[in-house]
Image (cartoon, rainbow, N blue to C red):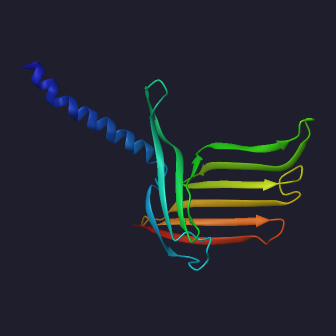
Amino acid sequence: MKRGLIQRTAPRYVVLVSIAAQLAAQDKPDFSGSWVLEAGAQSAGDIPQALSVSQSLVRTTVRGEPMKPFFKDITVTPALESGTSSQTYQIGVEGGTVAGRADGTADGLRTHYRVQWQEQALVIESGSYTGLTPESGQWAERREVWSLDSGGRLHLAITTRSSVAASRTVMLVYRRQ
């Protein structure tokens, strides 16, 4: 009789753990899904008319132990006039590259990137420069701010700046498909 009782209650416990893990991860928005451009600069060739987005949710440590769930990365596949290509960003990571020569001196293009949560918005920043510091030599910067409104629409603000062009910000709104 006890065996039957255990078998009937075990699945309920597993379901409760699963629901609790999903609720804990909801302190940050999940942008996963297919999105279609609703408003913004619809005629420009560099503006995605659609986006496919996937976020990876981590619930266990590398040893398989439960932990507070968090979004590890985001993969974005924009539909552009020139085609599609996916980019995966590791959330909470900052880095870059420095080109160098065999004699140990730096020469050439340097890059930097950062992907961080700022409250309920995901900010993706990247840039490159040929000088000794950012915004020196020939340089270019890109900043994307991702957020969801109360109606579940995706707001994407893209700001680009460079040493050869004025700063430009494009505000886009996508709806789930």
Which quadrant is the C terminus positioned in? bottom left
Residue sitting at x 78%, y 54% = 128
Name the foreground residue: 33 vs 16: 33
What is the tally of numbered marks visible in this picture? 0
Q: In the image, is residue 28 above or below residue 36? A: above
Split into 4 quadrants, where in the image is the N terminus? top left
Q: Is 128 displayed left or right of 24 in the figure?
A: right
Q: In the rendered image, which quarter is residue 123 located in? A: bottom right
x and y, in percent, of residue 149 in the image: 48, 65
Residue at point 64%, 72% (across, down): 170
Residue 85: image location, x then y, percent: 56, 58
In the image, what residue occupies the spot 76% across and 50% down? 111
Give residue 68's position: percent from left, percent from top.
46, 35
Asked if residue 19 lies left or right of residue 171, the reply is left
In the visual, does 87 lie left or right of 20?
right
Res. 41 image quadrant: bottom right
**Taking 143 as reference, is 59 above or below it?**
above
Relative height, residue 73 to residue 68 (above, below):
below
Apparent side of residue 116 relative to residue 73 in the rendered image (left or right)? right
Q: Which residue is drawn at 57% across and 72% down?
A: 81
Q: Residue lying farthest top?
A: 2
> Residue 127, percent across and down?
74, 55
User: What residue occupies the far left of the structure in this picture?
Assistant: 1
